[in-house]
Image (cartoon, rainbow, N blue to C red):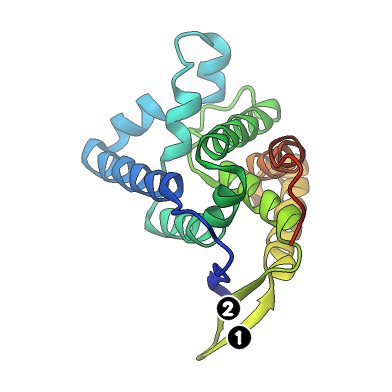
Amino acid sequence: MLPIGDDNSGRRTAPLITYALIAVNVLFFFAELIGGDAFIGNWAFVPSRFLANPFGDLPTIFTSMFMHAGWVHLGGNMLYLWIFGDNVEDRFGHIKFIIFYLLCGIAATFAQFAFSTGSNVPNLGASGAIAGVLAAYIVMFPKGNVRVLQGSQVIQVPALIVIGLWIVLQFFNSIGSITDTAQTGGVAYMAHVGGFLAGLVLTFLFRGNSTPR
């Protein structure tokens, strides 16, 4: 099932931050293509390097969450941010949303770091921050529906199912990444889990008195 859109009829504001985040991610990806391995090595988060020099490597906590490993990685993340980010931004407001997004990304980075402190593999991607956005969407829009492309048909599927399937996959893979690193395929699943859990907690702090719909 490929999600392609959701119901935006209740959205009150233009999702300026969501658009800006997508633009920055795309620009960073083109910078990666131009800069190659040297750019990735300088700006991705490398756990062992950060452990050795936390202050000097501090910027990579932020830059790494705007980088991607390839077109599919970028496209998948931006699709989910496009579909679900605008509604969350509308509910939080622009300023709270960017703070929320960055905090989820930071939490994701340190969740992965906690399980791979000695790793020399560069960690990069917006997946952890977007996982936090998905958590917020579930909390605030539990009855939302998502348009899904299934074969040649477009059908309506509850957002809980679409996001729920993604969550289950991440949790199972994160267990595998702890017990057998050979089966993770280089994907930082603990970052996904960390970002999602941070999103759940932060949503209840950021949404104020607004009620789910």
Front-lying residue, 55 or 147: 147
Say which residue appears at 55% left-offset and 61% top-offset.
Answer: 11
Q: Position of residue 111 (x, y in %)?
A: 68, 32
Say which residue appears at 73% left-offset and 44% top-offset.
Answer: 180
Residue on which the image places disc 1: 155
Quadrant of the frame with the N terminus: bottom right
Q: Tell me if I can see residue 1 in this picture.
A: no
Q: Amino acid at mark 1?
A: Ile
The quadrant where residue 60 appears: top left
Using residue 151 as the reference point, say whether residue 17 is left or right of it.
left
Using residue 187 as the reference point, say whether residue 206 is left or right of it.
right
Front-lying residue, 126 or 175: 126
Q: Position of residue 83 (x, y in %)?
A: 52, 62
Farthest bottom residue in view: 152
Residue on which the image places disc 2: 148
Quadrant of the frame with the C terminus: bottom right
Say which residue appears at 60% left-offset and 31% top-offset.
Answer: 103
- Secondary structure at numbered mark 2: strand
User: Alpha carbon of mark 2 to alpha carbon of mark 1: how far?
Assistant: 5 Å
